[in-house]
Amino acid sequence: MELNAMSTPQFLAWLEGEIQLHDKGKVIPPERILQDRLDQSLRDKLGQKITAELLAQQHYEDQVAEAVRQVKERCSDSQARLAETVPEELGQEPVRHWKDVVEAVSEEMIKNCRF
């Protein structure tokens, strides 16, 4: 059969027919693989749930908020200069994204202004 002589609708109809000849339905892996995937899914989901519970018990959000407050207070100059820093950095490296500059300022603040 010469495929070049077919129109697009004819080709698609022919292709669909060929696919149906070989269609075996959905591929389902062996039971061992299904069980392994179930185990991994349970570990992931239960791990996330337990992590969230432990973080809540330890007042994680409150601790993060307090640390942010302290770093911003101790490094207020970096925060104040942010509007100047971003254009300066982008002027030196135009291919850089402004978010990358903000991330770098954040890292520098954490490094220099311990909480």
Image (cartoon, helix red, strand yellow):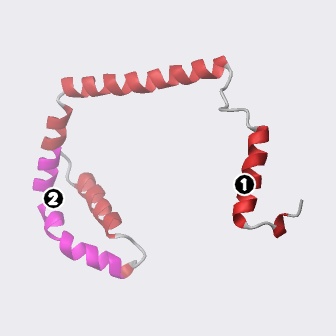
Question: Mark 2 belongs to which amino acid?
Answer: Cys
From what the image shows, is residue 62 above or below residue 72?
above
Q: Which residue is mark 2?
A: 75
Does the stretch in magenta take in 69?
Answer: yes
Which dot marks residue 13?
Answer: 1
Q: Secondary structure at mark 2?
A: loop
Magenta: predominant secondary structure element?
Answer: helix
Q: Nearer the viewer, residue 77 or 2?
A: 2
Res 4 quadrant in image: bottom right
* x and y, in percent, of residue 29 in the image: 67, 26
Q: Earlier in the sequence, mark 1 or mark 2?
A: 1
Which residue sits at x=72%, y=54%? 13
Q: CA distance from mark 1 to mark 2?
A: 67 Å
Q: Nearer the viewer, residue 22 or 91?
A: 22
Q: In which quadrant is the C terminus drawn? A: top left
Which residue sits at x=51%, y=24%? 40
Locate residue 11 relative to residue 41 in the image: left or right: right
* x and y, in percent, of residue 94 in the image: 39, 79
- For the magenta stretch, what is the residue range? 67-91
* x and y, in percent, of residue 101 in the image: 32, 67
Question: Mark 1 belongs to which amino acid?
Answer: Ala
Does the stretch in magenta take in 6?
Answer: no
From what the image shows, is residue 95 above or below residue 76?
below
Q: Secondary structure at mark 1?
A: helix
